Image (cartoon, helix red, strand yellow):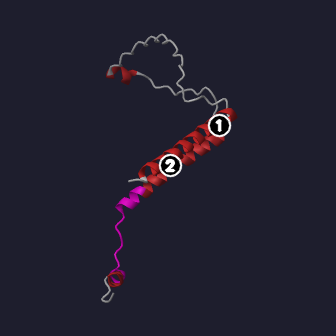
Amino acid sequence: MENFLPALLIIGGVIYKIYSEYQKEQEKMRKRRPHIPTAEPVAVPIPPPTAKRPIPPTFQKEHPSMVSKKVEQPVKQRYDIPEEVNRVREQRQHRKIETVDLEHQQKNKVPEFNLRDAVIQAAILERPYK
């Protein structure tokens, strides 16, 4: 109990010294990088709310009888698409079809069963001696 007070003072002194060194390092860092703000909060001005844009009027849905009477016209493109782009699009479409076919085959594929391999693997897993 007699050594308790000096030990407590030594521990307190060490903690204070560590804290003061930490403060010095923080001050040196601020001097090296003055563009970094301190931990104090800075008020940021909030821009005033902008006026809301008017909502465009909604279009009425066409009656089914009107749709059948319409003559469909091909959509005119505003620009020419280069050959390379068309080729890449076709390749992507082809790859998508291939992946769908592979997934379909894998789902419908029945796993092969080989009795000889099954017996060998069972013997390896369940050895009579350990």
Q: Is residue 130 above or below residue 65?
A: below
Residue at coordinates 53% horizontally, 27% vertically from top-left? Answer: 75
Give the residues drawn in magenta, as a range: 103-118
Disc assigned to residue 29: 1
Position in image of residue 21 (x %, y %): 60, 42
Q: Tell me which residue sits at (32%, 86%) in the image.
A: 127
Residue 105 shown in magenta: yes
Q: Quadrant of the C terminus?
A: bottom left
- Under mark 2, the amino acid is Ile
**In x, y percent, where is residue 25?**
63, 40
The image quarter containing residue 102 is bottom left
Query: Is label 1 in a helix, a strand or a loop?
Result: helix
Q: Is residue 30 left or right of residue 116?
A: right
How many C-alpha atoms fall within 10 Å of the one at disc 2: few (<14), some, or many (≥20)? few
The overriding secondary structure of the stretch rendered in magenta is helix
Q: Residues within 10 Å of mark 1 (few under 14, many from 20)?
A: few
User: Which residue does the numbered mark 2 point to in the structure image?
Assistant: 10
**Viewer-proximal residue among 127 and 72:** 127
Q: Quadrant of residue 120?
A: bottom left
Question: In the picture provided, is 63 more to the left or to the right than 40?
Answer: left
